[in-house]
């Protein structure tokens, strides 16, 4: 990102002149920037991973979330009424800027996120929302079938990934409640003021899927300390999530497998990049995620 590109993007919006900008999130996918103009401060997302159709689907979702006053950063219209700006340098969307930061992982921040995710998972009137989760078992098996997967030199990683994919494919076939999921509720996709949740952002991975996927993914985001499940945070999450959406006995029985599956699903995303271009940061992340998959049985105790 540079001043010339930002001014080019801003020319489509009624935000006036650029004063300053800074990156506010560094990760593996999107780039988010705090942009200060003479008419306010905004969040700019460079949609690195999304295609045009996916972004437009997300904009439709934002309309639904606005009706129920869900805590998120809402997109801002251009002067022509559109939300998306497509340029050779990328696809860009401006959002409301929400003051706040990444939370500390503690009981109160977990209470906040549990209630918000349960509210999201409880939404109905989803007839106009249709999007498949990109993280699915078919995608994992497709990756395993590629030549690049079998050429990857770190065979301990690929062997374990393949073994767990086969195991989980036999246990994830139960009929469980489905609905709207965010798909990536991690601290760096949230804004907090102290321990108060202000917004969950980056809905690019939203989908209609088994709701336990969101439960498992959020547990990874908010209940793991030093790559191990914290039992207090885990129990806090489940207790408060169920204040808004009660988990069935079948869901509770399947939860350990969905905690495994969401860790494996994240490993799939990183591994699909690694087999194209290896780097230590992502390889270490895959190793951490596979460690989580292995440890679920010993770290989880469920109270029915």
Image (cartoon, grey):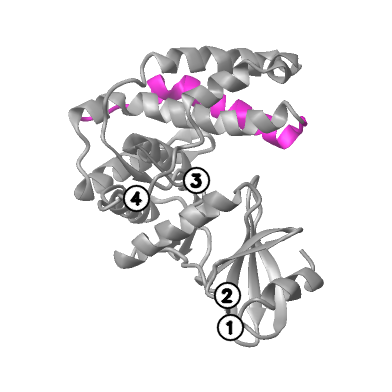
The residue segment tinted magenta is: 277-304
196 or 89: which is nearer to us? 89
Q: Which residue is mark 2?
A: 78
Q: Which residue is mark 1?
A: 40
Q: Are marks 2 and 3 in contact (CB under 8 Å)?
A: no
Earlier residue among tags 2 and 4: 2
Earlier residue among tags 2 and 3: 2
Circle nearer the viewer, 2 or 1: 2
Q: Let me know if residue 280 is in the magenta part.
A: yes
Q: Which residue is mark 3?
A: 205
Q: CA distance from mark 2 to mark 4?
A: 30 Å
Dot 3 lies on which element? Answer: loop
Dot 1 lies on which element? Answer: strand
Earlier residue among tags 3 and 1: 1
Q: Position of residue 30 (x, y in %)?
A: 63, 52
Badge 2 crowding class, 10 Å Cα cut-off, few under 14, some 14 to 19, many 20 or more, is some
Q: Is residue 157 above or below residue 86?
A: above
Earlier residue among tags 2 and 1: 1
Q: Position of residue 256 (x, y in %)?
A: 36, 25
Judged by its main secondary structure, the magenta piece is helix
Circle nearer the viewer, 2 or 3: 2
Q: In the picture provided, is 282 more to the left or to the right than 242?
A: right
């Amino acid at each position: 990102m540079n001043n010339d590109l930002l001014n080019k993007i801003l020319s489509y919006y009624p935000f006036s002149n650029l004063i300053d900008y800074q990156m506010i999130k560094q990760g593996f996918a999107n780039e988010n920037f705090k942009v200060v103009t003479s008419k306010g401060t905004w969040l700019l997302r460079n949609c690195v991973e999304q295609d045009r159709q996916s972004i437009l689907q997300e904009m439709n979702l934002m309309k639904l979330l606005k009706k129920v006053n869900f805590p998120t950063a809402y997109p801002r219209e251009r002067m022509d009424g559109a939300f998306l700006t497509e340029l050779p340098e990328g696809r860009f969307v401006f959002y409301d800027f929400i003051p706040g930061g990444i939370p500390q992982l503690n009981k109160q921040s977990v209470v906040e996120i549990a209630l918000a995710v349960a509210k999201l998972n409880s939404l109905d009137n989803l007839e106009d929302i249709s999007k498949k989760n990109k993280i699915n078992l078919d995608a994992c098996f497709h990756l395993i079938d590629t030549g690049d997967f079998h050429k990857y030199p770190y065979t301990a990683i690929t062997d374990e990934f393949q073994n767990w994919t086969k195991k989980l494919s036999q246990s994830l076939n139960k009929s469980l409640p489905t609905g709207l999921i965010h798909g990536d509720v991690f601290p760096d996709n949230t804004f907090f003021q102290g321990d108060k949740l202000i917004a969950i952002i980056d809905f690019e991975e939203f989908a209609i899927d088994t709701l336990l996927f969101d439960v498992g993914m959020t547990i990874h985001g908010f209940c793991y300390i030093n790559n191990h499940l914290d039992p207090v945070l885990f129990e806090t999450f489940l207790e408060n999530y169920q204040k808004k959406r009660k988990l069935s006995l079948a869901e509770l029985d399947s939860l350990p497998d969905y905690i495994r599956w969401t860790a494996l699903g994240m490993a799939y995303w990183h591994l699909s990049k690694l087999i194209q271009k290896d780097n230590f940061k992502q390889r270490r992340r895959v190793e951490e995620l596979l460690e989580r998959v292995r440890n679920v049985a010993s770290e989880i105790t469920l109270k029915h």
